[in-house]
Image (spheres, rainbow, N blue to C red):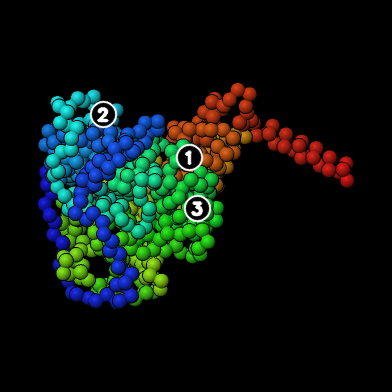
Amino acid sequence: MTPEPQSISTAQTTAFVLPELVRSWNATHTTYPREASVAGLFEDIAAASPDSIAVSFGFEQLSYGELNVRANRFAYRLRRIGVGAETLVGCCIERSLDLIVALVGILKAGGAYVPLDPCYPKERFDYLLKDTNTPVMVTQKSLAPFLPVRRSVKRICVDDDYAPPSSDDDGKPIPAGGPTSLAYVMYTSGSTGQPKGVMVENRAIVRLVRNTNFCKFGPEEVFLQFAPISFDASTLEIWGPLLNGGRLVVMPPQSASLEDLGRTIRDQGVTTLWLPAGLFNLMVEQRLEDLRPIRQLLAGGDVLSAHHVRMVLENLPDCTLINGYGPTENATFTCCHAMRAGGSVPDSIPIGRPISNTRVYILDEQMRPLPPGEAGELYAAGDGVARGYLNNPEATAEKFIADPFHCADGGRMYRTGDLARWCEDGTVEFLGRIDNQVKINGYRIEPAEIEAAIRCHRGVEDVCVVAHADGNGSKRLVAYYVASMAACLSACELREDLATKLPHFMVPALFVAMDSLPLSSNGKVDRAALPVPLSETPTSTEPPKTTLEQNIADLWKRILQTKRIGLDDNFFDLGGDSLLLVAVHSNLQKMLHVEIPVTDFFEFTTVRTLARHLEERKPAGCSLGEPRERAQKQRDAFTRSRGRRACGAA
């Protein structure tokens, strides 16, 4: 299946002239293999360094030669079932060696991969399969029994024991497609209530990782793939090393703690790491020493905290910290700002300058260039701009428009919806969103899509979803809803309903029931007048009894920013999310001086069950908790004893 080319708006084609200063800041051209495909470049690297390690996963690894042969065999399997130029291939595989084999194989066959997260709810999964009309889904044997079944979709397991019909399958397939062929379709949140499939071409990936200016790539670099492939940071993580002869380390698929991340960095010798802003803050606060091996630390997905940036630069003098900014529609990064020890760090961290072969414009409402200091909408242009949105010509025409500053070469630009301004030194400062779009843990989210899903619930009359910052510098989604008079609607019921429709990162952390939503003078919801959210009202009134229970409850109070925690209150019902859970895990391990699998915290989600579980698995002779009254008496006795000793010494 070959997606039809989609129209690009030509409504704005007036040839404005860029100020000379702005033009000089956009002089980002470098010579890179612009006419090559991802598959072709990988084959060149594999031919030049067949014995070099390409990818590591735990104790397993593949050389470039081995990965190339396995990907060739898989590409031939795909060809035999009809995959060719720009065939969209669903890819539902956990992080593993098999994932990398599948991605390289899909591109070698000429196809484009469509990331499908195994954790997606069935409704989301079904929508993506229908929208892409993919004829093939690649998965693993362990996942296959749990995936939705569609008669029109052929399913193929990359880890099947498969013997090729002949050794000819070891050789590279005849190329199908080139630099402007699709490489992947990645879905982002949509303001109309449905996600949008961003169509990214091979050239956009090559432009990101070859002969560029924001990051060092090469055989000496070791990248960690930590992001899911449904998140566009994975484009950098995977293809950065593989198209430059470096080594790719794949993080195990299970939920990872901060300790797990730090251990992988140390054990695998990771030198280049990307972290979303929230996780970056946690690692800097809790496990800063684990980042010491990192030479290039890229962070982004949201505004970076200047405090945490300074901590890195003051304590890790050999590390370059890079603030990376860019929408999926411009292949991961548009601007980057590198910071090193000894440099000044402003309170508002710039997003930097356009990366190689990328242009940035800051325009007013009439699309006229603005001088430094004036705020306007940021537009991205150059070789990273996506083809458009799959099956959505209206949104494509609205967002992907002709570049009036490069009319001669048919250039296009993408309007980001972000507010920004040029600084006097040529860096760009991000000022926020023009619309209501938000970023949560690096994911770009349209609140309107969540609101549309909530409105489908029969008991909801009105709803408004906003993002609020918590005390850790991260954002949490909050849903303010009005229930119908006849409905007895709880936050738990709404949350459970949404979990069947939306990915976990789009389910609000808090649900606030309202009699009505505040309106502005023009009749729209006044978001500024919505009450500051507190964690949802605890449903359990039974207080903690043991020291361990009290320690857990106190930690939850601090991280969830609530005043009362009952023994049987659910962490996630109180507004917790996976990032806050990681913070609880790290703090509790330090407090108790024991190692606890982070997965335990997803299973035991109340104070009572978690404390009981920890007591049951404690080492023999170790006491993690005791009745509060006895512990208090012992503390009082110790204090009195210490006081007597002090008086005697005087």
| Element under disc 3 | loop
| Element under disc 2 | loop
Question: How far across and down, in percent of the image, does residue 563 sit?
Answer: 55, 47
Q: Disc 2 residue type?
A: Asp
Could you tell which of marks 2 and 1 lies nearer the N-terminus?
A: 2
Kindly identify which residue carries mark 3. 318
Q: CA distance from mark 2 to mark 1?
A: 29 Å
Q: Disc 3 residue type?
A: Asp
Task: Pick out the residue farthest to the top.
Answer: 620
Question: How far across and down, in percent of the image, does residue 343 sit?
Answer: 50, 63
Foreground pick, 95 / 257: 95
Q: Disc 1 residue type?
A: Arg
Kindly identify which residue carries mark 1. 266
Are the residues at dot 2 and dot 1 in contact (C-beta closer than 8 Å)?
A: no
Relative vertical location of residue 503 with respect to residue 425 in this rendering, above or below: above
Kindly identify which residue carries mark 2. 159
